[in-house]
Image (tube, rainbow, N blue to C red):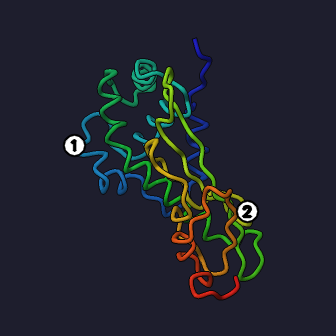
Amino acid sequence: MQNTAPFQADEFAALLARLPSDLDLDRLAIEYKAIRRGRKIKTGTELLRLALARGPGGLSLRDTAGWAGILDLANLSNPAVKYRLDNAVDFLEAVTDQLLTTASASQGLHWTDRTIRLADSTCISKPGSKGTDWRVHGVYDLGAGGFSNLELTDGKGAETLTRGAPVAGEIRIADRGYGRAKAWHRFPGTAAGKPI
């Protein structure tokens, strides 16, 4: 059996304390229809906790359902956990987007009028799969010390510079698989032939 360590009550409280004060999990959960009736999972905070236990916590659906019951979070069946997490995809993407926006808005370490970002992707395969099932595309901001954009696509999602909005004066570093002239036109200065 896999050795997993789900978020404990004190660790989850510490995680919540690190989130931006303007991040309203309840509003996002309702806005993105992750919570509709609120019978078992009533808040965005509870839904985030459930998702973290299942995803990064490494729990199976059965273990997640049992864990939620032990913590008095909710009494859920395995299919109920899956249903709620399937409906939470847009909510979790909105939370991630807001966290990335907050992180990239900081001044960080970059010099005035210049931002250096790295773009790359990685392939993920289901157990037993013979090909790529998903791709995670990331743009990492060296000055801010964190990701400014993350996207999950199916296996056909290509590497492209069009992932993650460019900023004026940005230098984006990527491997040659990203070298398509059409995508370069999104970057301020390059489309008009001006130096960056």
Q: Position of residue 9 (x, y in %)?
A: 55, 33
Amino acid type indicated by mark 2:
Leu
Q: Quadrant of the C terminus?
A: bottom right
Q: Going by the image, does 17 lie left or right of 111?
A: left
Nearer to me, 163 or 21: 163
Classed neighbour count for the residue bearing mark 1: other residues with Cα under 10 Å, few (<14), some (14–19), many (≥20): few
Q: Position of residue 25 (x, y in %)?
A: 42, 53
Q: Going by the image, does 187 lie left or right of 156?
A: right
Q: How far, Cα to Cα, is label 1 from label 2?
A: 42 Å
In the figure, 69 relative to 159: above or below? above
Closer to us: mark 1 or mark 2?
2
Q: Position of residue 136 (x, y in %)?
A: 54, 46
Residue found 62% across the figure and 81% down from its top: 190
Q: Which residue is mark 2?
A: 142
N-term mark: 1 or 2: 1
In the figure, 120 relative to 80: above or below? below
Nearer to me, 7 or 117: 117
In the drawing, what numbered circle is on residue 80?
Answer: none
Q: Which residue is mark 1?
A: 37
Residue found 47% across the figure and 59% down from its top: 23
Assign a secondary structure to mark 1. Answer: loop
Q: Residue furthest top?
A: 1
Residue 168 lies in quadrant: bottom right
Amino acid type indicated by mark 1:
Arg
Assign a secondary structure to mark 2. Answer: loop
Q: Position of residue 78 (x, y in %)?
A: 34, 21
Q: Residue furthest left?
A: 37
Residue found 40% across the figure and 27% down from its top: 72
In the figure, 112 relative to 76: above or below? below
